[in-house]
Amino acid sequence: MTARFQYVLRLADTCLVLGQRLGEWVGHSPALEEDLGLANLSLDLIGQARLLLTYAGELEGRGRGEDDLAMSRDQSDFLNLALVEQPNGDFGRTIVRQLLVDAFQLELYEALQRSADPRIAEVAAKALKETRYHFRYSAGWVVRLGDGTEESHRRVQGALDELWRFTREFFAEDEIDREMAAAGIGPSLAQLQPRWQARIDDVLKEATLKRPADVPYSWYGKRGDHSEHLGYLLAEMQFLHRAYPGASW
Amino acid sequence: MVSSDQVWRVLENVPDPEIPVLSVVDLGIVRHVKWGDDGRLHVGLTPTYSGCPATEVIQGSVARALAMAGYQDAVIDTVLTPPWTSDWLSEQGKEKLRAFGIAPPAESVDSPRRLFGSPKIACPRCASTATERVSEFGSTPCKAHYRCTACLEPFDYFKCI
């Protein structure tokens, strides 16, 4: 497997798994508007994943298309960030997870639209426009819930405290990230961190929430090291395709 | 060789599946009409949003319309660069939207006013600007959900992106 193939899979899988998680809210959201909002975010993310998976399949050159990569790989072959596979919990927890990822993807896509790889650059330029809407949505809700009632504040602060540790993985560079940065294909992740932090701090301040302390602990979903939750998500997402290989409609 | 004008006229009659008053040309998603080195007609389409479920339906209906007009071997190219913007909606398209009950994008994406909060959106039914946003996300990825506080009607707003 080449580094570039794995790098594109990381970008794609993060979108796909988060899109699938958000899709779980359809029909269950606290209000119709949020049902539509989360479904729209999910659609954008799955659309981004499709473009990236198609490209990953071409890079791999073994004839695998977007469906094969999405539906026929096992858990350890998925290279998404561990945060996005974490269960939805309540609406507040889903929104906190979304804020953390949206702010990261804003910085990431901003940098990737200048990637030396034109395919990655064009997907990033498109995704960036969509991600701005996602960030406005998640940031707006985190402020309302954080600066809302005693109960909403307690719940989103609790979600933030619990999910914060997963954000370390966003900026932890390994040899693939370094190789891509050296080739001008991806950004230096460590350099994205201060801008992400500033963006998050602005929202937390307005939301009257406290930024949790950093802890020396991290999952490496992007290396295929996942929490137990991903397997259940894939079982549901992949069931139809695995039970009826090649089914289409 | 036939002129590309004829192809554009065919495309002007292909409706968007979600907003059928708009053609794919009104929507600004047809990026090129040209004959390739392979001697075949190439029509470039760009998606409005990456995940818009209408994208594949549109590709299918464009291919069908072209085939009916005699271009059986036309190739549909997917074009991502530059990414689609609501600025590409034609003026005629904006009027069609308003008549259909959807408020068209209120300003250009590059407008400096965008730095200072949301623009005033006029109700497509009564033209009042006493409107409020219910949700940034509506019935399709390209629309937001608004309400008019003058005539009390809810309506869709085609958002700027």
Image (cartoon, rainbow, N blue to C red):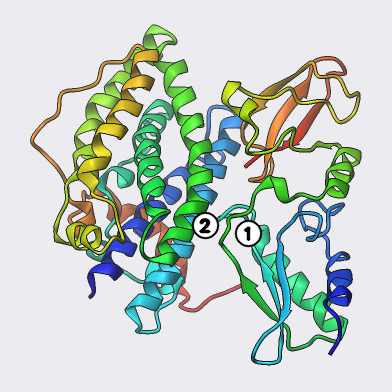
Q: How would you rate the neighbour count of disc 1 (Cα within 10 Å): few for under 14, some for 14-19, many for 20 or more?
A: many
Q: Amino acid at mark 2?
A: Gly
Tags 2 and 1 both on a single chain: no
Q: Which of A113/B11 is in front?
A: A113
Q: Is residue A196 left or right of residue A15?
A: left
**Location of residue A44 in the rendering, given as x and y in whole percent from the top left corner:** 53, 50
- Classify the position of the N terminus of chain B by image quarter: bottom right
- B3 relative to A197, above or below: below
The residue beneath circle 2 is A47
Between label 2 and label 1, give the one nearer the viewer.
1
Name the residue furthest left: A216
Residue at the image position 35 percent from the left and 28 percent from the top = A199
Q: Chain of mark 1?
A: B
Residue at the image position 14 percent from the left and 42 percent from the top = A218
The disc label shown at residue B47, or none: 1
Q: Chain of mark 2?
A: A
Q: Is residue B125 visible?
A: yes
Q: Is residue B76 left or right of residue A48?
A: right
Instruction: Indicate the quadrant where residue A75 lies.
Output: bottom left
Q: Secondary structure at mark 1?
A: loop
Q: Which of A46/A26 is in front?
A: A46
Q: CA distance from mark 2 to mark 1?
A: 10 Å
- A62 relative to A41, above or below: below
**Location of residue B34 in the rendering, given as x and y in whole percent from the top left corner:** 73, 78
Residue at the image position 30 percent from the left and 56 percent from the top = A186
Instruction: Indicate the quadrant where residue B144 lies.
Output: top right
